[in-house]
Image (cartoon, grey):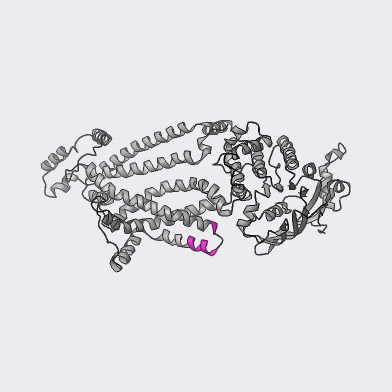
Amino acid sequence: MSTTALTGAPLLAVRDLSVAFDRGRRRVLHQVSFDIAPGQRLGLIGESGSGKSLTALAVMGLLPDSAEVTGSVRWRGAELLGQGERALARLRGSELAMIFQEPMTALDPTMKVGRQVAEVRRLHRSAEPGRVRPLVLAMLSSVGLPDPVRIADSFPHQLSGGQRQRVVTAMALVNSPDLLICDEPTTALDVTVQARVLALIDQALTREQAACLFISHDLAVVAQVCSNVLVMLDGRVVDGGPVDRLFRAPEHPYTAGLVATARLDLVEPGSRLPVIGDFYASGAAGPQ
Amino acid sequence: MPNLRRGATRLRIRGPAVTVAIRVAIFLLSLVLASVLIFVVCAALPGDIAQVILGQNATSESLAALRHSLGLDRPLLSRYLDWVGGMLTGDFGTSFFTRLPVADQIATRLAVTGWLVFFGMAVALLVAVPVGMIAAVRRRRLSGAVISGLSQIGLAVPAFWAGILAVFIFAVKLRWLPANGYVPLREDPMQWAAHLVLPVLSLAVVQASVLTRYVRSAIVDVLEEDYIRTARAAGWTRLGALWRHGLRNASISVVTVLGLQLATLFVGAIVIESVFALPGLGQLLLDAVAQRDLMVVQGTVMVLVFAVLVVNTAVDLSYVALDPRIRTARR
């Protein structure tokens, strides 16, 4: 199942991406295919263990050595699978960036966060003496951190979870990437902070005109950022399409369950809250 | 629970100056306790220095007279205070046996042991840090497993056996280096270095094996940290991320082990000194114990304890420099 781009060649083209561990005995991702066009935002939704993060890590080339990856991941037409660490490192942080789920441990505890953001810039754009610091401060304030000078001179342990996730977002955006992969960027945050960080990522994507692969287990969150969604279950893509179509007419019973649990405003007061199991019994209906 | 919580917060918000002051106070207290312990144990040791000096046939009157002239009949407390007070001014007392100042004997010997321990640790670190890093990065490959295996063998080898083997190969068979003895640095730097090579290597083999394992496991832990993945996602290669963001974090746990290892290095140096007939602190201590020369024993042990305590304090203070979570208060 693929979401075909409306205009031009895709930025990222993933075909039959499969991942296995234990010398092929444990297959965790089965022939995942999708395209992302420049500026397009694609949501990847499913429960934990459905293979969303693996898909993202496989695209970034950050899976552990023990993983066997097959299929094809093309970036601007060039194959990424099988590329060396050096070639991938040149793309990562520059054209492809990623925000991870856990902001508390994502930053180096022994380095001031301003230096960590500046480092990502220097790593890819070498000759800018004296211009990096102002850029970093501007970046920090653009991700909604007031008093960027104080934040830049802080160590990670001196910042809250929401502040750290903004710093990580600034690191991901500092080189204006063409594709931003967000792996549950708001899951570890308080609900109130979640909404703000989400709005901020949305604004940043619009400003940078960057494409996005947005991973979440929460359809409501994905719907805020993305127009198209893929639904994953047990390492396979089982459903997909525009968000409003998915809400109106889910193809797969699992999607119907996701939609029902995301639309709690439709639940009759006094009746039991829906759970995904009402619509889809895991293992009962085989994946398509 | 609330009390515990408050305690933890207080610990976290104390500044670096308080951390340093507390550590220095602990250092001084340890030093005092060590001096009491050393003195009491030496005083309680069986064996009579007067008997050793005068021989088995001495009369009880002459023994008592000698004990009096050595000051051994005075109360323990005043002997202890004399000893400690003297050390504070650099006077470690006079050897019962040779009648020479203990401080002079220790000073000349300390130079030998000091070089041995310093170069032993330096060589061990120069080997262990890069080798441990390679073993960690390649832990799933053959080369990593080979390094781990070799360091396991190195761990099992006693330093004196490594020393004897080194003498046999490089001094006896190949005749590249002297088998034993010592030449002071000021007399002949080349000969000084030549005489130190084998003892230092014998000492370093074991230390390097131990440290390699600690460096490896510290780096393996760090490699699995989220911030290494973040660094790679930002454009570092695996090795680049380790170099830039892993080493400093890994060094925090390696430095701890370094402090503990230094104590065993002193013990190892004493053994190596007797294998290579080096006139160091170890030989001085062994001779003094055999002769019941308590002033020399006390003074030498005190110097060794002082050195270990200084290193451990330096290790604790280095955390303040290495880890900003200790250095800076929460904002």
Occupied quadrant, residue B239: bottom right
From the top left corner, tell me how far across and down residue B93 is, in percent.
22, 39
Reply above or below: B110 against B151: above
B181 relative position to A30: left or right: left
Query: Magenta residues, as a range?
Result: B137-148
Quadrant containing the C terminus of chain A is bottom right
The residue drawn where x is 72% and y is 43% is A208
At horizontal 58% and vertical 38% (from top left) the residue drawn is A157
* Nearer-the-camera pick, A194 or A16: A16
| Predominant SS of the magenta segment | helix
Question: Which residue sits at x=65%, y=36%?
Answer: A138
In the picture, measured across the screen, residue A10 lies left or right of residue A101, that is right
Residue B240 location, x and y as percent? 56, 52
Left or right of A260 on screen, residue A111: left
Q: Is residue A81 magenta?
A: no
Q: Nearer the viewer, residue B19 or A135?
A: A135
Location of residue B193 with respect to A177 vertically, above or below: below
Relative to B145, is A225 on the left or the right? right
Answer whether residue A280 is visible to the viewer in this image.
no
Q: Position of residue B38 (x, y in %)?
A: 30, 41
Observer able to see residue A133:
yes
A30 vs A3, nearest the viewer? A3
Residue B262 point in image, percent of width and height: 38, 48
Q: Nearer the viewer, residue A85 or A164?
A: A85
- Which quadrant would the N terminus of chain A be assigned to in this image? bottom right
Disc tally is 0
